[in-house]
Amino acid sequence: MKKRASQKVLVTGGGGFLGSAIVKLLVERGDHVRSFSRNYYPELASMGVAQFQGDIADKTSVANACREVDLVFHVAAKAAVWGAYSDYYRTNVTGTQNIIEACKKHNVSKLVYTSSPSVIFDGTDMEGVNESYPYPTNYNAYYPKTKALAEQAVRAASDSLLTVILRPHLIWGPKDSHIVPRIIARAKQLVIVGNGKNLVDTIYIDNAAYAHILAAVKLDENPSISGNIYFISQGKPVLLWEMINNILKAGGLPPVKRSISHKAAWLIGAILELVYNIINIKSEPKMTRFVANELAKSHWFDISAAQNDLGYLPRVSTKEGLKQLEAWLSNTELNKMRGL
């Protein structure tokens, strides 16, 4: 990354998986970085990052964090697949509205928002679709629904605020706190959903963080991209179940061999969702309709817009990323993920 004038930058969710990777790159290029999160992170403190602790849904806390800032990376989100709609709305929609309002109040010039391709996922195969693909009429999970509402709010704000929206898909790598731990923890229970031939995009953590920095740089150089949405990935789709098996292999675990049809998994998910809602069970069901579709369908995207407008190309290959993941997955890390 070319040396640039130092900026004052806020990263929401700066202690999280993607947020901390973005923070690291910002610190390395000499920016004055602050993080806004619920918790305090010693790792951020060791990098000299100022930490603002608070609730993203609290307008005053967010406004204080945005004071005297040049650029905001809004990464914080509620990203699980199960929970109360009010919780998702509070974090993903109200939180984003608070960020937008605070940016305008304190004359923050640029906002880079982390969205998700799931905002357009309609349960069908998506093969090479671009950013013009419409939002679905209905959602069968609260995460994509609220992320779509937040994304639309950021787009609407681009008339008075420079914004870029990124849609990274299935971020993975060392320090992963979501995808890799789920796969490792459920290794013995995993079954292939569908025919196992569905292609998906993924993105290695370093590439996802790099794309965010690029988006901010290009927004400085070319304000006309404000309001644009960009898919970002490894640039080449992979077989989902091959990727899952590669992650298991990196953890020294055997591949998934058992299978179930997509229809059966979807029906099981629908029944479990109904039962969990009726009985008011808070824990996540073993299967949901959204997860069944995600595991059985293809979902990969055209990243040519990000290549053309942002100059984005993945810097770490999937092969190299898997090597880095394997090195990180020590016995200690594996035992944490297995709950041992």
Image (cartoon, rainbow, N blue to C red):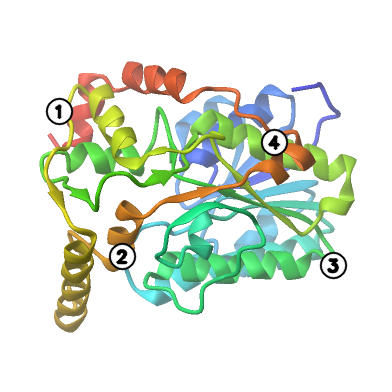
Look at mark 2 in the image and give the residue it sits on. 82
Per the rendering, the mark at residue 78 is none
Per the rendering, the mark at residue 254 is 1
Q: Position of residue 202 (x, y in %)?
A: 46, 39
Mark 2: few/some/many CA within 10 Å (<14, 14-19, 20+): some
Spatial distance from mark 3 to mark 1, Cα to Cα? 51 Å
Q: Is residue 139 above or below residue 200?
A: below
Residue kind at label 1, given as amino acid type:
Pro
Look at mark 4 in the image and give the residue it sits on. 213
Spatial distance from mark 1 to mark 2, Cα to Cα? 28 Å
Per the rendering, the mark at residue 159 is 3
Mark 3 or mark 2, which has the lower sequence index?
2
Mark 3 or mark 1, which has the lower sequence index?
3
Q: Secondary structure at mark 3?
A: loop
Mark 1 or mark 4, which has the lower sequence index?
4
Q: Is residue 57 visible?
A: no
